[in-house]
Amino acid sequence: MKKNLFEMGADFSDDWSADNKEKAKKKISTEIKVANKHQLHFAKEKRRGKVVTIVQPFCLAANDLKELLKTLKKKLGTGGTIKENSLEFQGEIKEQLKVQLEKLGYGLK
């Protein structure tokens, strides 16, 4: 390695590293729960002037979460997506969503 003209006193061979190279990974709970053990929270956000309803946290396998999203989108007649362990739906549909989740046996707060 070439020696820098402006040496600041840190020798990178002595276990020094740059802070911006390595990012800490988030720990995600992979515990899968049954429907009635969930404690779901609702949130509402405005994105580009439109309302998005968010329900989280779901502790389900990826395939089960996709199936749940598909079922809810059909019953509610709206668009939606999966982001990490939450479901996001287009529009302000908290009450309808609450009814459908209770029918499916999910616990709500």
Image (cartoon, rainbow, N blue to C red):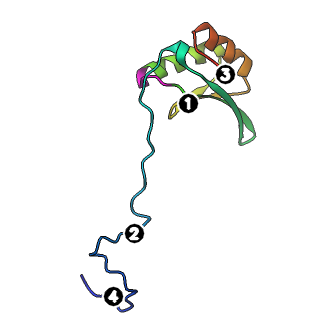
Residue annotated with mark 2: 18
Are discs 2 and 4 less than 8 Å apart at CB?
A: no
The magenta stretch spans which residues?
59-63
Circle 4 Cα neighbour tier, 10 Å, few/some/many (<14 / 14–19 / ≥20)? few
Magenta stretch prevailing secondary structure: loop
N-term mark: 2 or 4:
4
Circle 2 Cα neighbour tier, 10 Å, few/some/many (<14 / 14–19 / ≥20)? few
Q: Quadrant of the C terminus?
A: top right
Q: Farthest residue in the top direction? A: 103
Residue annotated with mark 3: 109
Q: Is residue 48 left or right of residue 74?
A: right
Q: Secondary structure at mark 3?
A: loop
Give the Cα distance between marks 1 and 2: 33 Å
N-term mark: 3 or 4:
4
What is the x, y in percent for residue 92?
74, 26
N-term mark: 4 or 1:
4
Q: Secondary structure at mark 1?
A: strand
Give the Cα distance between marks 4 and 1: 49 Å
Q: Is residue 91 left or right of residue 65?
A: right
Closer to viewer: mark 3 or mark 4: 3
Give the Cα distance between marks 1 and 3: 15 Å
Amino acid residing under circle 2: Ala
Q: Nearer the viewer, residue 102 or 83?
A: 102
Q: Residue at x 36, y 81 (%)?
A: 10
Are discs 1 and 2 less than 8 Å apart at CB?
A: no
Amino acid residing under circle 1: Ser
Give the Cα distance between marks 2 and 4: 16 Å
Q: Farthest residue in the left direction? A: 1
Q: Is residue 81 left or right of residue 8?
A: right
User: Which numbered marker is on residue 4?
Assistant: 4
